Structures are given as structure tokens and as C-alpha cells.
Amino acid sequence: MIKLRVKVLPNFRNVKLWGRNAKVLVATEILWGLPMSWFFFYQVIFMKSLGLSEILIGLIVSLPLIFQMFMPMLGGYLADKFGRKRVLMSFDSVGWIGAMILWYVASGPLALFIAMVFEGIVTTIYGVWETLLVEDTELAHRTSIYSYIQLIYIFAGLLTPVAGILVSLYGVDQGCRSLALIALIALIIVFSTRQIFLKESEIGKMLSFRNDQNTSVSKSSYMETLRNIVKDKKLMIMFALTMIGSIQYPLTNTYKPLYLSDPIALGLDAGIISIIPMASSIPSLIILSLVVPRLKQTRIKDALLFSYVCGILGLVTLILAPRGSLNLAVLSSILDSARYVAITAILRVLLVNTIDETSSFARAKIMSLVTTFSAMLTWPIPILGGYLYAINPTLPFVLCALSLALSIPLMLRV
């Protein structure tokens, strides 16, 4: 216990070295992450309970990805012109609050479509949020920022059985509406807190001030930024890895809860499947607490490779698991937790640090381009996943495993 405390304490001391915005965003992400993670886990099951087919579910889930093809570029432009905080607060609050109100009152596909349109509005700030998160914090301390953010979601996964209890007590319909209401209340508190305590980053101040002084000042255009990315081999590879990794979320997060509870798939009880996120949270918690914050730059590629191999093994285990096999579902989730950590934390750190090697002033535009190009690749994935699921429920996970396998040769070139 003493040795464990010694290893963990330096990671907590890193918080003092973060910029103010990183502290505010991570602290408020705790209240955002818990209820939203619970709701997202049961979101597809809720849609299924309203009578939607797998293909229609895929179509609805793909709507924010369509917005994500162009809205982040608008967000990057607006963030450079008017400041990161103003753009973040405007689009983030309107999008999420509007979406959660509609999820709470939804009774059919129309309300769900509109809710996803509001979630599409949120995609405007995807690159801006991450830009504000890391600006004003030195490169050496950014790994711990991403680790703490993912730890929040891991902790939320550990508490997913709380959501499972609500669903078991009140049924899928009323239980999911209760989760949406809890999330809505939490969001209002989060956005109020961020409005008070967030401040504009130093780079954001410089860019917006320069714009006010001289409207003809040329902050690099998206085409110029894209040309610079193409010239940088390492950044191009990071772009490709991030884009391939982006298809993981709409496949696994959309169809895994459905696969676990579907009678023609694993057929587990809708309440009991809440222990699956909890099972994956335990190894992720250990890795993010003890390994990732101490990970040296020279070891990041090795960590990515190992994590992707574990992810492939986890997906294969899920695909081969017989109906009703809770034990294999748990084992699959434990193995697959390494993939989650790799894509959401390790890969993102490598990306933002690589951007600094190119141009820190272009970060907002580069992050917006990453988000946009990822959306171009992934927007049809939920629909494709719906068709594949209708043919055979295991096929979305086969596609996910193949995308991981394709990433490995690219990693070897970093």
C-alpha cells in the first residue's frame, strides 16, 4: 500500500503544474462524465425500446457525425477570431442542454432526430475544447491531463451499476428518462461553473487581439494548415491513426450494449450488463493512474502497440462468446479496456505534442481538421454498423478489430 501511494502521489502533484483552464475543465468534467456516461451506455437500448430498428438507430447516431464534417472548422475559425472560451460556452451549452431536454421527453424518432441535431451543434467545439484544455500547460504535464480525464470516465464506468439499478427498478423507458434528467441537471451546473472560472488562453488572447488591431492579418488558412500537415510525415501518420481510431466509438459504443442484451446475440439481462463497463474500468483505472502519467515519450509507440493487440483479443473474445456467457463478456471488456486507454489518452497526447512540433498557433485549426476528417471517415459507420448488425450481430465488432489491425503497420512508421 505504501509503494502504491508513492507511485500515485507524484501524479496528483502534477495538477499544480497545469494551467488554470485545464484544472477547471477537468474538475467540471467529473460532474459531466458520470451521468453522461451512464446515459450513453443505455442510449441505444432506450431507442430500441421506442421501437426503432438497428438501421434507423444507426442513421440517427450518424447525424452528429455529419455535422462534425464541417462544424469543427467553423469552430476553429471562430475560436481564433473571437476567443476560445466564448465559442466553447456558446455552442457547448446550447447543444447539450437542448439535446438532453429532447431525450427526456422523446416518444418517437422525430424527437430523437432533433436531439441528435443539437448534439451535432456541439461538434463545433470539439477542437476548441481540446485546444483550451492544453494551452497554457507545458508539454511535459499534458499526459497527466488526459489521464485524469479518462480516469473520470473510468470511475463513471465503475458506477454504471447505479444506472443499471435505475433501469431494473423502473424499466428501460422510465429508467433512461431518469438518467437523462440527472444528466440535464448536472450539465446546467457544469456550464454555470465553467462560465465563471474559465478564462481565455494566452494564445487565444494574442490571436483575437491581432484580429481586432488588423482585420487583414493572415492567420494561416485551413488550406495552408492542411498543406503543412501533408508535408509533416509524423503528423500525417498521427492524423491517419486518429481517423482510424475514430470509427471505434460509433461501432462499439453504439452496438455493444445492444449486442450484450439482444436475445439473438449474448442475451444478457439489461440490468446486469451494467457490470460490463465496471469490469473494464478496473484495469483502465490502474493503467491511467500508475502507467500513463509516467509514460515516457520514447515508450508511447510500444504502449500503443500493446494496447491495440489487447483490444483485438478483447473483440475476438466477444465475437466468439456463446449466448449467455457473462464471464467471457467480462473478460472481453477487461482486454478491450487497453484499446480504450490507447485511443482516448495515449494517442491524443502523442497527437497534441506532435502538433506543437509543427505550430502551436495553428493548434485550433489543426484539431478542427482532425475532427473534420475523422467525421468524414466515420459518419456512415453507424449506418453501416446497423446493416452489418442486421445481417449478423458480430459483424460490427469484426470491422472494429480489422481497423485496429490496420493501424499497427502505421504505428511502426512513427
Image: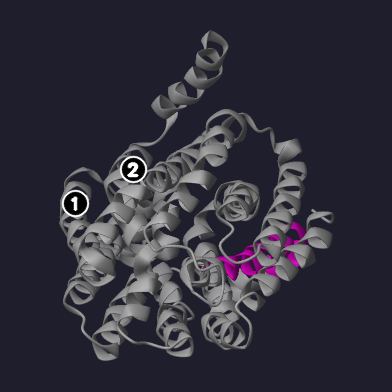
- Which is more toward the observer, 222 or 91? 91
Residue drawn at point x = 52 percent, y = 12 percent: 1
Q: State whether residue 215 appears in this view.
A: no
Residue 137 among magenta residues: no
Residue drawn at point x = 37 percent, y = 54 percent: 204
Q: Secondary structure at mark 2?
A: helix
Say which amino acid is labelled 2: Asn
Side of 211 relative to 308 (left or right) = left
In the image, residue 327 above or below residue 72: above
Residue where numbered disc 1 is placed:
195
In the image, residue 14 above or below residue 401: above
Say which amino acid is labelled 1: Gln
Q: How is the image coloured?
A: one colour
Rate crowding at label 2 as few (under 14), some (14 to 19) or many (20 or more) other CA atoms within 10 Å. Answer: many
x, y percentage for residue 30?
Answer: 32, 44
- Which is more toward the observer, 155 or 322? 322
x, y percentage for residue 143?
Answer: 55, 38
Residue where numbered disc 2 is placed:
21
- Which is more toward the observer, 6 or 157? 157
- Which is more toward the observer, 409 or 353? 409
The part of the chain drawn in magenta is: 229-249
x, y percentage for residue 291?
Answer: 62, 31
Q: Secondary structure at mark 1?
A: helix
Asked which quadrant contains residue 207, the reply is bottom left
Residue drawn at point x = 55 percent, y = 77 percent: 264
Residue 246 among magenta residues: yes
